[in-house]
Amino acid sequence: MTEPAISITHVTKTYQRGGETLRVLDELDLQILGGTFYALMGPSGSGKTTLLNLIGGLDHPDSGDVVVGGDSLTSMSAGELARWRADHVGFVFQGFNLLPVLTALENVELPLLLTPLKKAQRRAQAERALELVGLTDRMHHKPRELSGGQEQRVAIARAIAVDPAVVLADEPTGDLDRHTADQVLELLQRLNRELQKTILMVTHDPVAAGYAQKAIHLDKGKLGRIDDNRKATVTAGH
């Protein structure tokens, strides 16, 4: 794929804190090609999560344009953005955000309730997503019966259940030990390679960033260097 899956043009985002205006993103330009795996790095307050939220349609920029999959998000209403997110983006968070009263299968099926799929189709699609992350044998277990790594795999299955073109991950391994984190990162790599998912992952961990094809560095709302990890011959963590 050669077309940009994500195109950020002259994007500025500010927040008010007390009487002070904080410029979190400052005239940012960025293009991410479809089917690539990028890590987004930078110090606390550099704008990483804000940028992820704009790309995921969770917030609007003050100025500039955000285009994802050919759709301009900047002029969409809140309702239009909600419908767009349900169809086009999968989210993975550090805290898993699974509902404790539901099984793994029911958690993965949740976003499919917003689609026109029938019950049997939803169930089949959720089962397929759990199969992709290697949890077929745990689909009827509730979160308390799973390890942290398994919970994050369920969260990834939920993110890909609607077959989104873009997966946005915010510190997905932040609560995991190194071995378990490596397993989750290998899964993200496989989703990128085998399913051609475009993945943008916020991380502070340079080892985690090494699993991505490229690492983007943000500092004070501006784009810094972009490291090309594909030049390496050994996968990070091994």
Image (cartoon, rainbow, N blue to C red):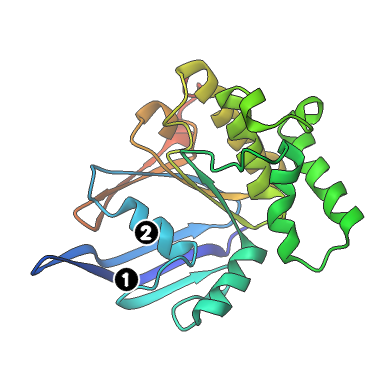
Disc 1 is placed on an element classified as: strand
Give x and y (percent) for residue 61: 34, 73
> In the image, what residue type sits under mark 2?
Leu
- Most extreme residue toward the right, as rendered? 120
The answer to which image quadrant residue 139 occupies is: top right
Residue at image mark 1: 11
Give x and y (percent) for residue 102: 70, 41
Name above or below for residue 212 compared with residue 237: below
The answer to which image quadrant residue 144 occupies is: top right
> In the image, what residue type sits under mark 1?
Val
Name above or below for residue 4 compared with residue 156: below
Residue 46 falls left or right of residue 189: left
Q: Is residue 96 visible?
A: yes
Nearest to the observer: residue 50 or residue 223: 50
The answer to which image quadrant residue 220 occupies is: bottom left
Give x and y (percent) for residue 79: 56, 78
Residue at image mark 2: 51
